[in-house]
């Protein structure tokens, strides 16, 4: 399993890095949209759709929404509105995560509600990544996002394994602990501390950035838990099998889906 994970990562990493470094922002949006469409296909399985025409129909709907989001952002400058809607979606997951699974047993989500949730997960995230890339020091901003999310995840994993005692969300992801989450915050401190020099932020007021990073870390954890919730609801371990050793695309990007629109919107609103 570990060998498969390493091989898959070694194949994917150069592709992702090449896209970030060498593609224009519209090209990067298109590349990330393709990944989002694969995620949309996996989401149809979590929605419970079985007929191929219905699954392909949903993927086509997501593709149309991604194209419309790009056009509306370029022509009418509504990007922050789309990012804001995406951010609100992730924050409102706090309404249904604590009550799982009883809340879903009492009132199962309809296909339309699940489909809307998928759109709100995928579309703002792709736009958020493109927004970061298209701004000042765009490549550095994307790596700032990646470093923040990945170090949080790594810190949570190792601290949770070593010191984890109190469960964070036992009915959703029994392996996650409160101690692990705190470890994730600690692991992300070097990323925040080196922001002016490593990630091109320059001189700025530290307070807004630190507050924003705390919010991004929290929402990245919510992204992970939310995808775990829907997988548990469907009774599957992974969202797909496309990535050997890793599962599906959604399994690898769940935290980024939540963090990208929040960071992109926050940097703009704070003027960082």
Image (spheres, rainbow, N blue to C red):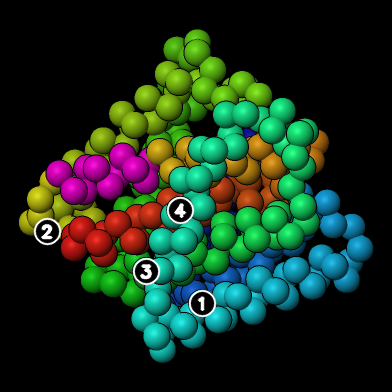
Q: Is residue 114 something that shows in the picture?
A: yes
Residue 249 position within the rendered picture, expressed as x and y whole percent measured from the top left: 64, 54
Residue 22 falls within the magenta-colored stretch: no
The vertical placement of 30 against 99, above or below, is below
Which element type, helix, strand or loop, lies under badge 4? helix
Q: Specify few, some or many for label 1: CA neighbours under 10 Å numbering under 14, 14-19, or 20 or more.
A: some
Residue 232 image position (x, y, % from top left):
73, 35
- Judge whether 99 appears above or below 141 on screen: above
Residue under pointer 3 = 80
Residue receiving disc 1: 69
Q: Earlier in the sequence, mark 3 or mark 2?
A: 3
Q: Residue at x 64, y 38 (%)?
A: 228
Q: Do the numbered discs 3 and 1 sit on residues whose CB atoms are within 8 Å?
A: no
Q: Which region shows up in magenta?
A: 207-217
Question: In this view of the protein, which residue sits in the foreground, 2 or 61?
Answer: 61
Q: Which is more foreground, mark 4 or mark 2?
A: 4
Residue at image location 72% in from the left, 75% down from the top: 60
Find out whether the residues at labels 4 and 1 contact each other: C-beta distance under 8 Å.
Answer: no
Q: Judge from the rendering whether residue 19 lies leftward or rightward of residue 98; answer left or right.
A: left
Nearer to me, 89 or 226: 89
Disc 4 from disc 3: Cα separation:
12 Å
Looking at the rendered structure, the secondary structure element under dot 2 is loop
Q: Earlier in the sequence, mark 2 or mark 1?
A: 1
Tag 2 and tag 1, C-beta contact below 8 Å? no
Residue 88 marker: 4
N-term mark: 4 or 2:
4
Query: Do callouts 3 and 2 mark residues in contact (Cβ within 8 Å)?
Result: no
């Amino acid at each position: 399993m570990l060998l498969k994970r390493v091989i898959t990562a070694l194949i994917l990493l150069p592709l992702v890095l090449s896209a970030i470094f060498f593609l224009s922002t519209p090209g990067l949006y298109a590349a990330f949209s393709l990944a989002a469409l694969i995620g949309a296909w996996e989401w149809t399985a979590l929605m419970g759709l079985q007929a191929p025409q219905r699954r392909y129909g949903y993927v086509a709907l997501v593709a149309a929404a991604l194209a419309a989001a790009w056009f509306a952002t370029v022509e009418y400058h509504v990007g922050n509105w789309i990012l804001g809607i995406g951010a609100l979606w992730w924050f409102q997951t706090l309404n249904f995560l604590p009550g799982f699974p009883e809340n879903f047993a009492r009132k199962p989500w309809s296909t339309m509600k699940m489909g809307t949730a998928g759109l709100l997960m995928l579309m703002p995230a792709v736009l958020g990544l493109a927004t970061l890339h298209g701004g000042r020091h765009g490549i550095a901003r994307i790596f700032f996002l990646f470093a923040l999310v990945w170090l949080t995840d790594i810190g949570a994993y190792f601290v949770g394994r070593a010191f984890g005692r109190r469960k964070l969300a036992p009915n959703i992801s029994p392996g996650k602990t409160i101690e692990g989450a705190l470890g994730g915050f600690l692991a992300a401190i070097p990323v925040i501390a080196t922001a002016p020099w490593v990630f091109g932020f320059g001189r700025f007021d530290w307070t807004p950035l630190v507050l924003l990073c705390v919010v991004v870390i929290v929402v990245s954890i919510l992204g992970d838990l939310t995808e775990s919730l829907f997988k548990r609801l469907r009774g599957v371990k992974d969202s797909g099998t496309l990535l050997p050793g890793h599962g599906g695309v959604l399994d690898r990007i769940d935290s980024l889906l939540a963090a990208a629109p929040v960071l992109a919107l926050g940097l703009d609103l704070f003027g960082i």
